[in-house]
Image (tube, rainbow, N blue to C red):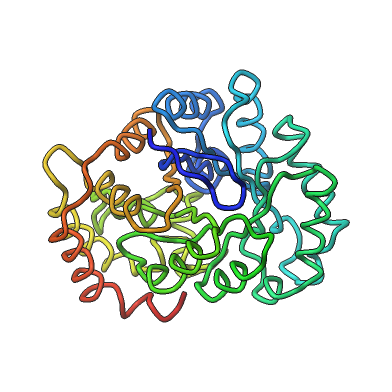
Amino acid sequence: MEQRVLGRTGRAVSVVGLGTWQLGADWGEVGEEQALAVLSAAAEAGVTFFDTADVYGDGRSEQIIGRFLRDHPDVFVATKMGRRAPLDPDEYTLDNFRAWTDRSRANLGVDTLDLVQLHCPPTPVYSRDAVYDALDALVAEKRIAAYGVSVETCDEALTAIARPGTASVQIILNPFRLKPLERVLPAAAEAGVGIIARVPLASGLLSGRYTKETVFAANDHRTFNRHGEAFDQGETFSGVDYATGVEAAAEFSSLAPAGATPAQTALRWIIQQPGVTSVIPGARSPEQARANAAAAGLEPLPQPTLEAVRELYDRRIRAQVHDRW
């Protein structure tokens, strides 16, 4: 699989990574052996980059990855911190950063974390000098090798990109969320900051498998967070109204080239956006992990398909999401 350097980390990662929120919580039940099978399938398919967070299953996702790392120490693991405490800018202190990263180091079984990302903190955090000073201190102490941010909005991304120590930005990017193409990806490329594209399938909408009658489990965020009841609405279906999303996804499915699924088409679209380092779809089964990884081997989408994606977004999606994030 193609490898790209992840911004200022200086390390290469696979263009298709693995997001592991599903292996922790909020997507229905996934057993530990099933989760390990997903990690194994991804690695066997060429994935060298796993993304997790300390709150996914209250550390369960990190712990499962840590078990996997014992036999696969070369996988690059990015984790996130900051949402175990109240979302108060004053919580983002060096003492808390040390405690949070020490917990993640223990969960993952490593001395130094490859990459730690601030996990969608309150907007003022991105502008505080003391926050970046504390992150620099973690690097100096070898608790972490590099740091980045996971953001909700493009403005937050641009604020973080301007900081010289920011190695990467994780942001929602998919055919239903095009705003990052305007300023964020060009700014990151100019600054040498990596881009990690999350929610690449709009919480599964872009797989084309769902209908308006689909029912998700009660403990699945696609049930309990459709209107932002638990966390930012943009994390669920990319902020698109579900009924609208299903209809737009059906149109998107018609753009898939022969031999590719709609999900693979969405991933291929992301991979070929200038400035993207890696896209991190989740997977609940080994089959899904292998299918996602296979998107890296597809031929680039032709210009007419790219134009059709833009037209679909402008016509069906833009009014709902473009000015919100």
The total of numbered circles placed on residues is 0
Against 45, residue 83 (above or below) is below
- Quarter of the image where the N terminus is located: top left
- Residue at the top extreme, as displayed: 71
Against 90, residue 43 (above or below) is above
Could you tell me which residue is drawn at 27 percent across and 48 percent down? 207
Q: Nearer the viewer, residue 291 or 194?
A: 194
Against 228, residue 283 (above or below) is above
Tell me where residue 61 sits by quadrant. top right
Could you tell me which residue is drawn at 34 percent across and 38 percent down? 292
Residue 272 at x, y percent in the picture: 31, 52
Residue 24 at x, y percent in the picture: 57, 41
Could you tell me which residue is drawn at 62 percent across and 71 percent down? 162
Decide if residue 4 is on the left or right side of residue 72: left
- Residue at the right extreme, as displayed: 95
Residue 85 at x, y percent in the picture: 76, 60
Residue 219 at x, y percent in the picture: 51, 49
Q: Nearer the viewer, residue 96 or 142?
A: 142
Could you tell me which residue is drawn at 55 percent across and 64 percent down? 191
Against 268, residue 178 (above or below) is below
Tell me where residue 78 sits by quadrant. top right
Decide if residue 109 is on the left or right side of residue 20: right
Decide if residue 92 is on the left or right side of residue 62: right
